[in-house]
Image (cartoon, rainbow, N blue to C red):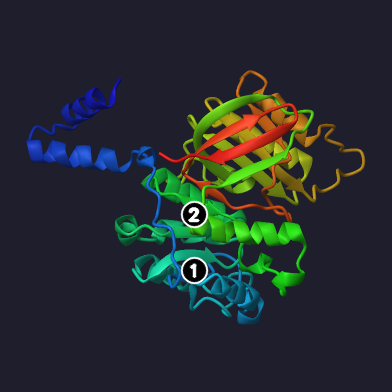
Amino acid sequence: MNRKHFLSALATAAGLTTLPALARLQQAAAALQPHEERLLIPPYLRPGDTIGITCPAGHITMEEIKPAINIIQSWGFKIRVGNTVNKTDFSFGGTDEERRQDMQDMLDDSAIKAIMCARGGYGSARIVDQLDFSSFVQQPKWIIGFSDITVLHCHINRLYGIATLHSKMCNSFPDDFSKAEPIVQQTISSIRDALSGQQLHYTTFSDSRNRTGAAKGVLAGGNLSMIQSVLATNSELNTIGKILFLEEVGEYLYSLDRMFNSLQRAHKLDNLAGLIIGGFNRIKPDDPGEEFGRTVYDIVMEKVKDYTYPVCFGFPVGHQKDNYALKCGVMHQLTVGKEEVTLDELRN
């Protein structure tokens, strides 16, 4: 049944015979539809623009974010430190209400052109449904972060079709940028490049277990457990036709299988354009006598064996040094070859 017929049938069943009532029904139905087709990209930043720093999840101190502040200011941007920095509520960066209010203030402040989440941990899902994105939709800005912040990426991508930036956060900035490893310098600099509007291009060595091919689609994804956790919620990610990237850290192999199985059962792997597997690091050892007997590669390929889209392993994204900035909600070209893998941002 198509959407028009569905609305007519629902209106008849409910006894809604007036045009105003039907219009209200249509508006309500439209509000539930994903708006990813718009591919709205927030304005890129210029020197002098302000980036806000807030803690929607775990707590962090002012001292810990000073390296990030210094580096971001060296790029020519201003910094607005949110009220949640230095606050704690056990593991959280303040109470739910404090974290919600701090994020809300930054979403609503037109002078703030991007919001960097200070760190991950856990907590974004506890406040995301209480956030009002009406001002944000009128004046989009870049939301920056990864790990727990995947909840915000999924929510904004699903409901508003606005691009966000999956990247390192304040707690990953080196104390002395000039002395940092080249890979750390490059990944931190990729944040500046993305925010400044550079067209991102990444090339990495191809894993022998990759499934070769080419794909074009909107880039979406992030932390596996976060994506699995938002299934059947307002934030559930629409993966149809997307290039999906996934990463995870600190899980048992059977837990990874359970999460991939959830995505499979929810049909999130059925109609992808392509699949990117990033870092799956610090995997917990099996209990003696309870060995799971499958690798990450085995788990993934078992779930996607019936499809033909390209799959690559070991892409530089995740809880690791080589965690490059990726623009979620933006068109990309993925090419998985025998020798190398390329991911190219596309422009309309």
Residue in view at x 47 percent, y 69 percent: 51
Q: Secondary structure at mark 1?
A: helix
Residue 170 horizontal side relative to residue 46, left or right:
right
Circle 2: is it few (<14), some (14-19), or many (20+) Cα within 10 Å?
many
Residue 132's x, y, as percent?
35, 60
Given residues 113 and 96, the one toward you in this image is 113
Q: Amino acid at mark 1?
A: Asp
Residue 96's tag is 1
| Label 2: element kind | helix
**Residue 171 appears in which quarter of the rendering?**
bottom right
Image quarter where the C terminus lies is: top left
Assign the N terminus to one quadrant of the image.
top left
Q: CA distance from mark 2 to mark 1?
A: 15 Å
Farthest left residue in view: 18
Residue nearest the observer in this picture, 46 or 308: 46
Question: In the picture provided, is 348 more to the left or to the right than 220?
Answer: left
Residue under the image location 55 percent in, 75 percent down: 73
Residue pointed to by mark 2: 152
Query: Who comes first in sequence, dot 2 or dot 1?
Result: 1
Residue 314 visible: yes
In the image, residue 52 lies at what x, y percent?
A: 47, 71
